[in-house]
Amino acid sequence: MKFSMLALAATALAAVQGFSVSPASVRQATPLFSAAVDVDTKAALATAANEARGLAMDSIAAAHSGHMGLPLGAAEVGAILYGSEMTYNAKDPQWMNRDRFILSAGHGSMFLYSWLNLAGFDLPIDELKNFRQHHSQTPGHPEFPNSEHTTPGIESTTGPLGQGVANAVGLAASEKMAEAVYNTDDHKIFDHHIFALAGDGCFQEGVSAEAACFAAHEKLDNLIILYDANEVTLDKMAEYTQSEDVLKRYEAYGWEVYDIDGHDLDAVQTTIAAAKASNNGKPKFIKCNTIIGKGMEETEGTNAAHGEAGVPYVDKAKSNIGLPEGEKWYVSEGTRNFFTDVQKKNEAAYNEWQNTFAAWKEANPALATQLDNAVNDKVPSAAEMVDSIPATGQTDAEATRVSGNKAIQQIAKLVPHYVSGSADLHGSCRNYIEDGGNYGAGFDKSYAGRNLYFGIREHAMGSILNGFAYHGLFKASGSTFLVFVDYLRPTVRVASLAELNAVSYILTHDSIGVGEDGPTHQPVETVSGLRVIPNLDVYRPADAEETVAAMIHSVTRKDGPTALIFSRQNIDQNTDVDYKERRNGALKGGYIAKKETADLDLIIIATGSEVPHALNAAAEMPGARVVSMPCTSVFDKQSADYKESVLPSSCTKRIAMEAGVSDIWYKYASKVVGVDRFGFSAPGDTVMEELGMTAENLKKEIASM
């Protein structure tokens, strides 16, 4: 049965008008523009909203899995974003000046897939029919394009609540940086906005609060957060676990806040237009009061609407909102035509931008090359960097955090789009880029600065770094003490599964060698805890040259992030091996740091600060080989021939040493000298000696084999 567009629109508008909030509950920080949607467009948007609801219901019902509440409850928000207020080109989803949309409440992924299909992205109805199925482009939660999924229009991997809000802050920060670095007085090539849709769960998670403070402090007024305020969480109504006024909280942070009826197309459009036009140094927070699961009377407005509990009522709900009875994944010709017109409008803006971009490139050839390199991830190869970065010449013992400081200066010269930041620990982690300037607003900062100050906000730092990577214009690293990486571990995990090679982590004070600060600051399980994250390369270098290699790897790797583990204490240099041999060996994850001078009868494997102990222990053992293994995951990916040349299977007498938990090393050795307990407060040398991290104890353990 076919419904006329007029009938569909009338039903849709009636449904939209069925929800309202009193004028007294509407708060706005600035006057709104008179930009009400015209009658024909409003009818088309209302129809599209209900058809998006239908797509979500049919896909979730077919999968018998998913979350129906948000796609039904926030449909009018989606209609305004994709049908009116966002600038994008569905035919060129990687256009660098597009507006970005992030679904922080990633469980509501059918909201996003429905709107991408309607807006003309290459996400056909068949993919919606395969929602949550193997090899589909519509996974359970949105996934940034990677080797598993290449869904166009997905700007961020979301699912862990709150992460998308913080990712959006990172994209907004990156966009401000792009404006400052690349725009000129004559040509503006970056001026887009970052949108994110989030729910109560996102704002209960602390990471969103950390990131919101950063966004307000750095005046990221290109950021617009839409709060799907449906008063529901999974277990209970939201009032069961929260009582704060979220709007007042964000207002106190320094955001511009709005409070609207999220089902009123005029209110949504007018408010978003006002937020986009307000360049007052304040990020924007729009509370959209909605009914979760709107249109499904059996569950709407309750926590039962959150998931797939409404599946038995899908056919009735679709009929109630005016969709043709018996037709699944229905999209009217009128809606397709409407979005064809939207795309024509967007393509006109896109073509105008292309003209500006062409003129900018002609006027700024050096900047154009830098931008092209950034967008296409062009950096010198690892081999080229090994050759071009001068030998450190380091012969005295030196902490690898100090070696890292020297190396990062070289990397910053070779990769102009490389930036770095710290969670209030630049002075300790030593990752400050000299002459790079400081990022942000006020004081001595500018948006072109290459050093970011995140404050004591590790979790937000990790999410913001991911946001920089999602934005696609800068490589970004962030630093803290290794022991505090667990504060940002969820973001490291997402970076790894999203294959974000533009992200790296500089984690210092790497072991019990920290000493006097005691066990709260002495990581023992942490390095191995990072090593077990799939697709995360963890480098713990043993000297200055290995540190150079680790830094090189972090900016040349193509398929995921890198964690750089640096020491606080000084480490002896292995000057018996040529600097390029150490660099190239470290780039393979492991190499021979001392070759036996007699028949091979023992292999000592060590990493980081324990390599000098291994070298000292082997000095009087002619048949002993020492293998430095700064990165186990990279070593494991080497050819079978190379691994056999380093760790020949004929030599089974092997011992490994690391100042951390021992389990991981049994993959390579039959005996491990490790630290399977927490440390204690004392000078670092004392802690190391008491817990067996010395050449003498290693010799003793070898003798017992």
Image (tube, rainbow, N blue to C red):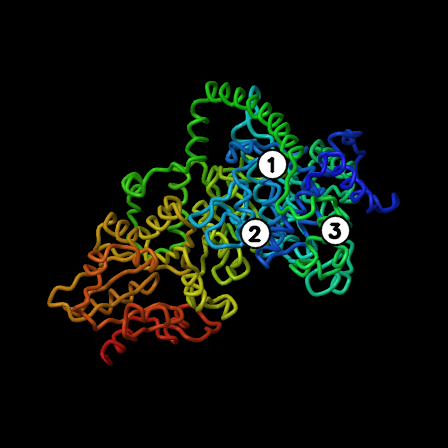
Q: Which mark is residue 119?
A: 1
Q: Name the side, left or right, on which 100 lies relative to 316.
A: left
Q: Quadrant of the C terminus?
A: bottom left
In the rendered structure, which disc, 1 or 2, sits on the residue that comes first in sequence? 1
Q: Residue 501 at x, y = what percent? A: 43, 47
Q: Are marks 3 and 2 in contact (CB under 8 Å)?
A: no
Q: Amino acid at mark 2?
A: Thr
Q: Is residue 431 visible?
A: no
Name the foreground residue: 287 vs 517.
287
The residue pinned by badge 3 equals 294
Q: Is residue 630 above or below residue 322?
A: below
Q: Name the side, left or right, on which 290 lies relative to 309.
A: right
Q: Name the side, left or right, on which 658 lies relative to 117.
A: left
Q: Is residue 324 above or below residue 564?
A: above
Asked which quadrant contains residue 514, the reply is: bottom left
Q: Residue 229 at x, y = what percent? A: 74, 51
Q: Are marks 3 and 1 in contact (CB under 8 Å)?
A: no
Q: Amino acid at mark 3?
A: Lys
Name the foreground residue: 702 vs 526.
526
Q: Residue at x 44, y 75 (%)?
A: 677
The residue pinned by badge 2 equals 158
Q: Amino acid at mark 1?
A: Ala
Which of the two marks, 3 or 2, is nearer to us in this view?
3
Name the foreground residue: 330 vs 509.
330
Q: Is residue 285 above or below residue 375?
A: below
